[in-house]
Image (cartoon, rainbow, N blue to C red):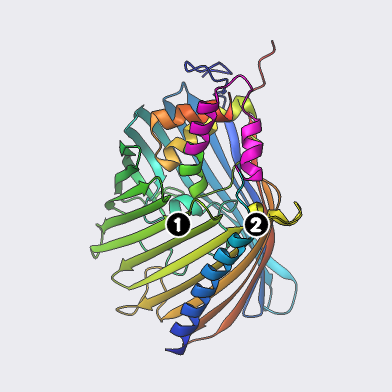
Amino acid sequence: MKRYLTFLSLLVLLLLGGMGASALQQDQPSTPSSQKASSTASASASHATQLTGEQVFQANCSRCHTPPMSIPQRATGTIIMHMRVRARLSRQDEQLLLKYMAP
Amino acid sequence: MNAQDADDSGNHAGYVPVVTGAVGYVHNVNAGVTTLEPQINPVLLVPFGSHLLLESRTEFTGFFQRENQTTGPFTGKVFKSVDYAQLDWLANSHLIATVGKYSLPFGIYSERLEPIWIKNIQDAPIDVNIGLRTSGAGDGFMLRGVATEQPGYTVQYSAYFSARSNINQLQAARTAGGDASIYLTHPRLELGGSYQRFLQDRQINNASAYVSWQPPSIPLDLKAQYDYTRTGNGYWLETAYNFDKLQIPSLLRRFQTVGRMQQFFALNGGGNGVPAINTQRFDFGLNYYIHDDFRVISSYGRSFSAQQDANIWNVGFTYRFVMPLWPERKK
């Protein structure tokens, strides 16, 4: 019983720690990493497309890993095909990610 | 194969063969016994157009311990295994058909979090082998994809059948199963479940339920999974917090803290890749992203069981690489 309580306390501490740390932050439009990701998009790409591609990334890829910023453009299509299989993405999501990662 | 062409939708993504994957090294100390674990996991990707993909991941893991566990020179060997070697046909928006050797889609850990550059804590959960007998992979076919995609939610699925195989590097059990999950877009919450029927020798059912949550306003990643099989059941719960949104010096924003707790309850004597006795464990990790593809990892854990309580330390690094195998087209 003591161990269960210890585990429960650790869990609560973890959650409280995360929430406490978040209270220190201020609202920002995007994270440094996502800012870097946004910078890969060309200036001519529409803002709406960037947002949608980033949203697809946040909704799917970010569930498992941080944004990979150093993918050579000529490999992007192959990598996103691979991730479409791994993450069970739709064709539409794949296209939005391609525009986001290799505009 | 297209060397590098603009896609029909106007982007400039290239579809060239690629070797990607990760290199890592973990210095592990478990109950006073040191293990050196260098590893490299190359993934070969060969696209044929934009609808057909050949992909294969091989794992080379070194395992070196002192001759008498705590004294003497380090000895050991390098283990090699093919995690998957499959051909994928990206048929349409809802269907991907896979044939070959594939990772079994059971729970959230084995298929999605297992690569060394992704997992936050290098040691796998205690109950990770549930649903993954005998090799973590299946030989046969799998259908997967998006069942429906709406503004508020997405439903994803996998269904597979695997034949029994004892061929070297193609070991697999005769199994059938599936996985389904729903992702709620606005709360960024995923709920899912997996089922597997083990169809050889003693036929048994394996089941798993999992949750993944990334609250929109907090850079927190919470994942949990419960697994059940005839020889035991258990759960793990992991939270990771990235410092990248904090108002602190940029060098400190690259830290990530991780916590994981887990419990396993043995049933019917345990076995089949899971402990024979009840085991509990917690881990705390601190990772530092030097670059998005290179990070230093560290963790401390303590394991409790009737057999032994032990401290577990891990220190190391992981590096993710991407190497196109086709030169860039000259303009």
Vertical side of B198 occupied by B183: above or below:
above
Which residue lies at the image location 24% right of the left edge and 65% below the top edge? Answer: B202
Please name the amino acid that badge 1 sits on.
Tyr
Vertical side of B65 occupied by A99: above or below:
above
Residue B100 shown left or right of residue A14 in the figure: left
Please name the amino acid that badge 2 sits on.
Phe
Mark 1, secondary structure of its residue: helix
Chain under disc 2 = B
Locate the C terminus of chain A and report the quarter of the image it occupies.
top right
Residue A44 shown left or right of residue B7 in the figure: right
Q: Nearer the viewer, residue B284 or B275?
A: B284
Q: Residue under label 1, please give it.
A: B109
- Is B98 in the magenta? no
Which residue lies at the image location 66% right of the left edge and 44% below the top edge? Answer: A32
Q: Nearer the viewer, residue A43 or B300?
A: A43
- Is A30 in the magenta? yes
Q: Residue under label 2, please give it.
A: B243
Q: What's drawn in magenta, residue-wise?
A: A29-55
First in sequence: mark 2 vs mark 1: 1
Locate the N terminus of chain A and report the quarter of the image it occupies.
bottom left
